[in-house]
Image (cartoon, helix red, strand yellow):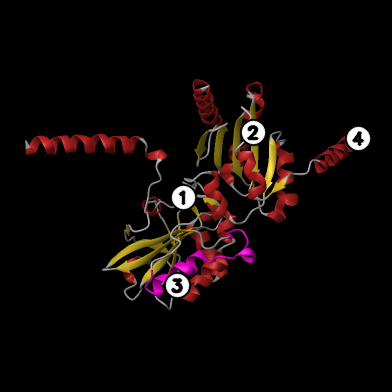
Amino acid sequence: MKTLKLLTGLAILLIISAFAVGNMDLLSTGYSVGDEAEDFNLKNVDDKMVSLADYEDAKGFIVVFTCNTCPFAVANEDRIIALDEKYKDQGYPVIAINPNNPDVQAGDSFDLMKERADEKGFTFPYLLDEGQKVYPKYGATKTPHVYILKKENGKNIVKYIGAIDDSARDASEVEDKFVENAVDELLADKEVTVQTTKAIGCSVKV
Amino acid sequence: MSEKVRSDDKKEIASTDALIPTYDFNEFESTLHQNDDKVHVINFWATWCKPCIAELPYFDRINKEYADRDIKVTLVSLDFPNQIESRLIPFIKKKDIKAEVVFLDDPKGNSWIPKVDESWSGAIPATVFYKNGKRKFFERSFTYEELSAELDKFINSTKNKD
């Protein structure tokens, strides 16, 4: 009887998962707030490999999927630098990741990433998602796309997904600084009030 | 030679006459909810978005080839406000886009993106089909064949309902 129940349960599970796989393109995949984010090991513009585990003293991370070529990403570069400058010393460094495949978007090649990081004086790592393996795990769909992680019991837990602020295309019209609000709340040991936000951005090029 | 110059001049005047309607989302929102028995195809794009400009001619072609099927194509530009004259208008002229183009000038994406579709992350291109209360949303890019197949499917599904 027990085995029968188990088998029925297994059959139902199989049917459900087959349905889920079949409808993959209809479902948004990737992390939700509350999920544990996997670590990665990606090459930085200084040719060194970077993992979240390298940051022993960090309280968390501001992970930003961004690139050289998207005008909305470019419009946010100064804001990303400002976030790193404000929060790195408080334990929330920025980690930027370029999710685009340089074979599809030539302007996002590793060499041009180096050039851009140098021109803008990026104060944070700017990593290439080689083989485009990390961004789908997060579920990033566009640049810029921010994930705030907080270390809890040795795990990196997703606390916020979305935009830097409420005016992606124009810094002068910003009224609500979503990422700053969220990190400030985390630093004060509070729950994040606004956990997901939307903004126009460039689709990831793969 | 002089005649050619004159005809080019005419074209120039005609295009500057055709100003692009500009809306914030409140003004634009009714475009997403017309109960007029037409099939509406609404594409969100920008001249700075590569996959968008690749598929834009397909939407223009849909506008032409489905003309007898009570269809309305609206191309919603999300360009930068300071690039309307320098990029958007020249692009429409160069590509000879005949479908209606509007400029959605509203930087506060977080407030309006979910009103287009709850599932939209904000990545473009993105497209809505709707007819009266029935709608379908796509956060993806299309080839002409894919677009026309999806549209045929949608048109058929609305017919079954009627």
Instruction: Establish if A106 lies above or below A188.
Output: above
Q: Is residue A187 magenta?
A: yes
Q: Which numbered circle lies on residue A184?
A: 3
Identify residue type, mark 3: Asp
Task: State the extent of the magenta-drawn residues as a range.
Answer: A167-190
Query: Disc number at residue A141?
Result: 1
Q: Do the residues labelled 2 and 4 touch (CB within 8 Å)?
A: no
Cα distance in 3D space between marks 2 and 1? 25 Å
- Density class for disc 4 (Cα within 10 Å; few <14, some 14-19, many ≥20) is few
Question: Label 2, on which residue?
Answer: B73
Q: What element carries label 1?
A: loop
- B24 left or right of B123 in image: right
Q: State the separation of the CA atoms marked 2 and 4.
A: 38 Å
The answer to whether residue B72 is visible is yes
Looking at the picture, how far across and down is residue B135, in whole percent?
A: 52, 34
- Chain letter of mark 1 equals A
Label 3 crowd bin: few (<14), some (14–19), many (20+), radius 10 Å: some
Sequence order check: which comes first, mark 2 or mark 4?
4
Q: Is residue B33 magenta?
A: no
Q: In the rendered image, which quarter is residue A1 located in?
A: top left
Chain under numbered label 4: B
- Vertical placement of A31 versus B99: above or below? below
A94 with respect to B83 (left or right):
left
Q: Which of marks 1 and 4 is in front?
A: 1
| Amino acid at pointer 1 | Thr
